[in-house]
Each structure stands twice: as C-alpha cells, then as structure tokens.
Image (tube, grey):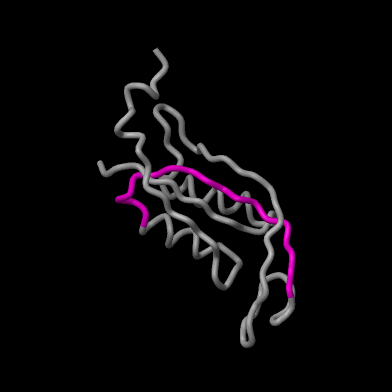
C-alpha cells in the first residue's frame, strides 16, 4: 500500500455532509480500525470571480463571502485519483479549493500507536 497523504477540501457548509460522505465512500478516512474519520472547521471563504465565471454563491466580478467548511482526512496516495474524481462530481464550485499534503506518519508509526 502506498504512503498516506492528507486531503483538505473547502466547501460551502450546505455541501459539507455530502463531501464527507463521498470522501469516506471513496476509501478516504481510515485510521487503524476506524473509518469515516475526518476533521472539519467552519469559516468564511472570500473570493471574487473574474469576468466569465459563474460562482455558485454570489456574482462574477463582485467580492463575496460564504460560510464554508474545511474538511480534512487521510488516504493512501494510490486511491487519490478516484477520491478526487468523486469529490469533483459533487462539489458545487467551478474551481474547488483542494489541498493535498504528504505526511510523515509512516516514519513515526510506532510512536503514534497507543501502548
């Protein structure tokens, strides 16, 4: 199995449960003997769509604010393409903000297990 990575998806709060479900259904969020693991924080996303855009919330060429959630979870890198495809199918934004991070957990796996 490949190394674990972290994916962070920013989404309108109205779509957060659907994004969490798609992440888990696609195989993300397994930690040991647990599945559907994720962490979410709420915040305000700010953006301005340029000419020719069709924002899900607000109008093009106008500075907007939206109630959003940051959803993060881990997954094996080998399933990332399938997870991204699934998330992009349900994400409402034209250009979703998605971050992907490498993790060092594999170097410290013995220290991360409770004795």
Residue 83 is left or right of residue 1, and the answer is: right
Place of residue 43 in the rendered image (x, y in percent of width and height, measured from the top left) = 70, 51
The one nearer the camera, 103 or 78, is 103
Residue 73, position as x, y percentages in the image: 48, 43
In the rendered image, the quadrant that contains the N terminus is top left
Q: Residue at x 69, y 54 (%)?
A: 13
Q: Main secondary structure of the magenta part?
A: strand
Image quadrant in which you'd find residue 9: bottom right
Viewer-side residue, 65 vs 35: 65
Q: Nearer the viewer, residue 1 or 66?
A: 66
Q: Residue furthest top?
A: 115
Residue for point 61% across, 43% down: 40
**Position of 39 relative to 62 (above/below):** above
Would residue 108 appear left or right of 8 to someone viewing this image?
A: left
80 sits left or right of 19 in the view:
left
- Residue under the image location 42 percent in, 55 percent down: 83
Q: Is residue 8 above or below residue 61?
A: above
Q: Most extreme residue toward the left, as rendered? A: 1
Chain part drawn in magenta: 63-80
Determine the residue positioned at 42% across, 32% down.
31
Residue sticking out furthest to the bottom: 52
As for residue 71 lying within the magenta part, the answer is yes
């Amino acid at each position: 199995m490949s190394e674990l990575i972290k994916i962070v998806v920013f989404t309108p709060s109205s779509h957060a449960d659907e994004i969490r479900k798609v992440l888990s259904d696609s195989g993300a969020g397994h930690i040991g003997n647990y599945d559907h693991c994720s962490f979410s924080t709420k915040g305000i996303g700010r953006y301005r769509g340029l000419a020719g855009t069709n924002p899900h919330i607000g109008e093009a060429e106008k500075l907007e604010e939206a109630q959003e959630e940051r959803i993060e979870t881990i997954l094996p890198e080998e399933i990332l393409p399938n997870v991204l495809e699934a998330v992009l199918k349900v994400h409402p934004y034209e250009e979703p903000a998605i971050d992907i991070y490498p993790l060092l957990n594999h170097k410290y796996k013995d220290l991360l297990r409770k004795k």
